[in-house]
Image (cartoon, rainbow, N blue to C red):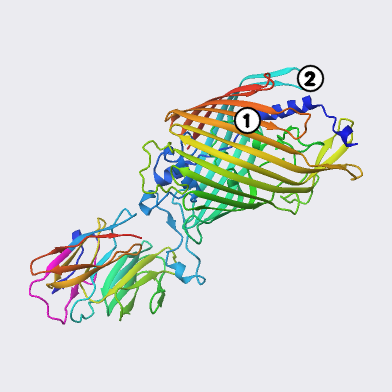
Amino acid sequence: MFQRLSAYHFVARAVLALLVLAATESTALAVPAFARKYQTSCQTCHIVFPKLNAFGEAFRLRGYRMPGETAEMVKEPPVSLGAPAYKQLWPDSVWPGEISSAVPLAVNVKLGDVNASTLNEDGTVTSVKNDLQFPREVNIFGAGTLGDHVSYLAEMTFSENPNGSVTVELEHARVDFDSPFGPEDLFHFRLGKFAPNVADGFQEMWISTDAAIDSVFAYNPIGINGGTGLAGDVSPSPIALPDRVRGIEGYGMINHRALWVAGVVNGVGPSPTDTTGRFDGNNAKDVYARFDYKIGGMGLDGDMGGRPAPEKNWRDDSLRLGVFAYRGDASNINFPVTTEEGLNTNIQDAHFLRTGLYASLFFKDLNVFGVYLHGSDSLQTFDAETAARLGTVEPDFHAWFTQADYLFYPWLQGSFRYETVTPADPSVPSLRTGVFNASALIRANVKVMVEYQRDLRQGDNHSLNALLRFAF
Amino acid sequence: MIRHSTFLGAAVVAAALVAPNAPLGAAGSAISGTVKVTGLASGADAVVYIQQAAGTFPAAKPVEMDQRKMQFIPHVLPVVAGTTVKFLNSDPTPHNVFSPDNEKYNLGTWPQGQTKDHVFATCLKPPCVYTQLCRVHPEMEGFVVVLQNPFFAVTNKEGHYEIVNVPPGAYTLGVWHAKAKAQPKPVTVGADKPATVDFTLGR
């Protein structure tokens, strides 16, 4: 029975995967509200935005506070919501806080000129030339601190659709409690919807390409014999290393050099047939953890150990190594799959594990980084009509990518990324993709990108996009 | 007659005239200097004072701390123990004054134009710092710093201070700031021989 069910057309599946590959965009943040608060340039924290330099990474990890921050660094004094002396009066008074004197909003706008070629299932090729997606996306951010030990980030993204409608997504909405106790920066806690630090260093604030790292963040493990490709807009949300989570995370830095991360999150969302209104697809929580160590360069908290910071603030000769793991439970969440024979089934991933290694090397103007990811799943297939269990498989897959960023000038960066994923279903060959990107800052807050993405297995799938991004 | 002031007059010290019972030198001299506070743009509002001077010092005339534009003015007010501080409300909105420090007090809430007095009678271990808060407006904050003697000054926005008419002698000079600290320093003042003492305060 099971062998018969597994008789998919792998070619069709691979094409689907590639279509998705060309369409998935990375998400990234650059928050000019901080430039206003500190009266400083974007380059204080970013190399070519949104990619962070070591100082920006420390600023982020410290809860949007500069390393060694003093009151005189803040050029836009906050509004007091209570004199500090009220701390002595608690619980007989409200613990004092503060807010920024200016509304801490920032806007990112992205315009795109899209040229794409896509191989269809029937063997034809669809070409799109100079599709002016003006605008492609607008992001509105709010970010800052709320007095001692509290910070926040909220982001809404507006994406315009071809029919003129607009899709709105709340990408971030989180509050952080930064060093509420213990040694400074050893304990931070955040809750809300956020990009988990399990992907610190290789997602969101570090990826300057427009294309996302689909091999790591978009692999869909669902299939009779395991996953066959990328997920795209599959609902419920795909079982992958998540780029956004709803939950609680703790993280901190140990002795300037080590980073620990641990989180408990909702995990996979509800199936389309779930009418409870819940955000979590089941009652089980997913958990993740990470540990990094950085050798050389600036400490993760900005500590330089008495050494002067490099004159060129994008340089940070260092090696950072990390290990991470994400364990999820998608039991009782149905992923409908129709077999080639027309049998409607539901597949559930009873539990899954993603483990990975991360490395990032900075040497002068070059940054090479990458991730190896191994995944294992426990897939249970049920007859959609009778709910009878048809079988269980426990497939494995692995994926990896490596990216090199080179800064030719402080305003010009070239990037190349190679990524591959070997799906669990042995009938599907590995997906391999190459991405070339040239990013130029024509102003500190205005970036022009030219990006070429190519399916290295099927040359008819490729795209060449020109993008303009600005932030204010 | 002893007069204490701030250099360049940026901050007003209201307890201006004190008649000490202790014999003072015929001709006092001055102690001046600069206070820097690490991490702050301004060294203002630090109180520089002689920790212990010989003799006893009666209370000065009453001094005033105003509540104006939702602020305690002056922000920092040093006084000799026993001094009465008159808390004036110059705002059209009611203000309250209370302090959670030392013996604690709450003077109540009163409208524009009225004052309430409080006597800072004793201070066993100077400086005795009383944070002034307003229940109606929690962001308001001021400080009354009670000292043993009238030889003190408040730094201006450049961090400068000057204590004048200091009797010749050897003293220990302390400094108080709401957000930073520094160790006291010895100072010797001779007749017509001013001294300079600078401080750098840290967190």
Q: Which residue corresponds to the image point at 59% horizontal and 37% vertical from the top-left?
A: A27
User: How far apart are the two marked residues, 1 and 2, measured between alpha carbons?
Assistant: 26 Å
Image disc number at residue A223: none
Q: Which residue corresponds to the image point at 42% horizontal and 64% vertical from the top-left?
A: A84
Secondary structure state at the residue bearing disc 2: loop
The location of residue B171, given as percent across then percent down, is: 18, 72
Q: Does the segment drawn in magenta span residue A106? A: no
Identified by mark 2, the residue type is Asp
Image disc number at residue A419: 1
- The part of the chain drawn in magenta is B11-31
- The kind of secondary structure the magenta stretch mainly shows is loop
In the rendered image, the quadrant that contains the N terminus of chain A is top right
**Does residue B66 appear to the left or right of A407 in the view shown?**
left
1 and 2 marks on the same chain: yes
Q: Which residue corresponds to the image point at 51% horizontal and 30% vertical from the top-left?
A: A405
Relative depth, front residue between A359 and A96: A359
Neighbourhood count class around disc 1 (C-alpha, 10 Å): few under 14, some 14–19, many 20 upward: many
**Does residue B18 appear to the left or right of A137 in the view shown?**
left
The location of residue A168, given as percent across then percent down, is: 64, 40
Marks counted in the figure total 2
Residue where numbered disc 2 is placed = A122
Q: Does the segment drawn in magenta span residue B28? A: yes
Relative depth, front residue between A366 and A66: A366
The location of residue A318, given as percent across then percent down, is: 46, 39
The location of residue B85, given as percent across then percent down, is: 30, 75
Q: Quadrant of residue B71?
A: bottom left
In the displayed structure, A117 sits above or below A286; it is above
Q: Can I make out residue A290 in this image?
A: yes
Relative depth, front residue between B107 and A48: A48
Secondary structure state at the residue bearing disc 1: strand
Identified by mark 1, the residue type is Glu
Which residue reaches farthest top?
A124
